[in-house]
Amino acid sequence: MNNPGIVLTSEGVVVIDPGGTVQSGEMVLRVIKKLIDEPVVAVFNTHVHGDHWLGNQAIRNAYPTVPIYAHANTIQRIANGSGDEWVKLMLDSTKGKSAGTRVVSADNIIKNADKIIIGDTSFDIMHYGIAHTDTDIMIAVNGNEALFTGDNLFNGRLARTAEGHIKRTIEACEKAVEIKPGIIIPGHGQSGGMDMFNSSLDILRILYKTVQQQYEQEISDFEMKPAVVKALDKYKHWETFDELIGKTISQAYLEIEQADF
């Protein structure tokens, strides 16, 4: 359900977010074999949510010494039990088809402004504190050839923001694209350029702005829902919109209320 990334370097293949099950990771390896007969030489995990990294297991099974990179907060939270929670969540959501998946955590810590050089390819790490979660990294490839946003950016679905901060997610994404990337790969949904980026981020921009306007008129979060939904009319068909819109409005309201004091 996420977007695994495959980057070909002069030293071998780099995988970004190999998927949410060992079976997904095995699928990524099969795709790589169709593209190129080169080993996987590194893996990056963009954040703590297991639908992006539980595929690490398959990569490590095939390449036991491959380094797996993630932010320190990701590694710590997995060690504290988040990994086991995600194994169970994926097992339930796949109705048992992810059986055999186990926790294989990243073991190489990266932080904001790190530059990882692999052969002829550079990977610049961006971490701006809490955004989608407090564990997120975004990755720029070769300066600005490509930008992997992880779940800071969704395309075609309303993001789950409960573990993060809506306004800071917007700010982190806007800061990341100052490099003017040639292609932007969101955590979920189709990749694209700045048009895709702006339309995908606008759902949070418009939501936050509308909630703020309603808040200033002293309208409660549950009363403002019709106005917010109307402002987001062109996005109401997006996946998870109906499921998450009420919770996202409430979260934006609490963020704005907190900033007001």
Image (spheres, rainbow, N blue to C red):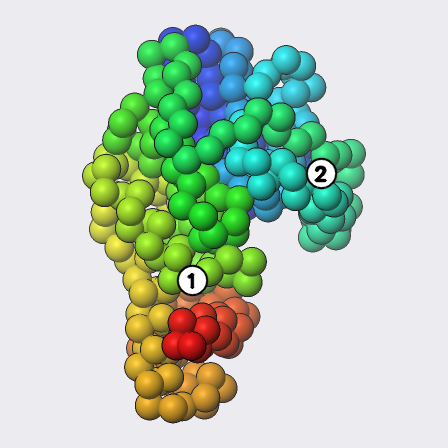
Mark sitting earlier along the chain (1/2) = 2
Left or right position of 185 against 164? left
Left or right position of 256 against 18? left
What is the quadrant of residue 137 in the picture? top left
Q: In this view, does 172 lie above or below 161?
A: above
Viewer-nearest residue: 120 or 242: 120
Placement of the C terminus among the 4 image quadrants: bottom left
Q: From the top left corner, tell me how far across and down residue 23 is, in percent.
A: 66, 33
Report the residue at 62% width, 22% height from top: 59
Q: In this view, does 28 lie above or below 86?
A: above
Report the residue at 27% width, 43% height from top: 177
Left or right position of 188 against 181? right
Viewer-nearest residue: 176 or 157: 176
Q: In this view, does 50 lie above or below 143?
A: below
Q: What element carries label 2?
A: helix
What is the quadrant of residue 199 in the picture? bottom left
The amino acid type, in three-letter code, at marker 2 is: Ala
Q: From the top left corner, tell me how far across and down residue 2 is, in percent.
A: 51, 43
Q: Distance between the residues labelled 1 and 2?
A: 26 Å
Q: Is mark 1 on a helix, strand or loop?
A: helix
Residue 146 image label: none
Reading the image, the residue beneath label 2 is 79
Report the residue at 38% width, 10% height from top: 119
Q: From the top left corner, tell me how far across and down residue 255 is, in percent.
A: 45, 70
Viewer-nearest residue: 217 or 159: 217
Q: Tell me if residue 49 can be seen.
A: yes
Reading the image, the residue beneath label 1 is 166
Q: Tell me if residue 83 can be seen.
A: no
Q: How crowded is mark 2: few (under 14 residues within 10 Å), some or many (20 or more)?
A: few
Q: From the top left corner, tell me how far across and down residue 11 is, in percent.
A: 43, 8
Report the residue at 37% width, 84% height from top: 215
The amino acid type, in three-letter code, at marker 1 is: Ile
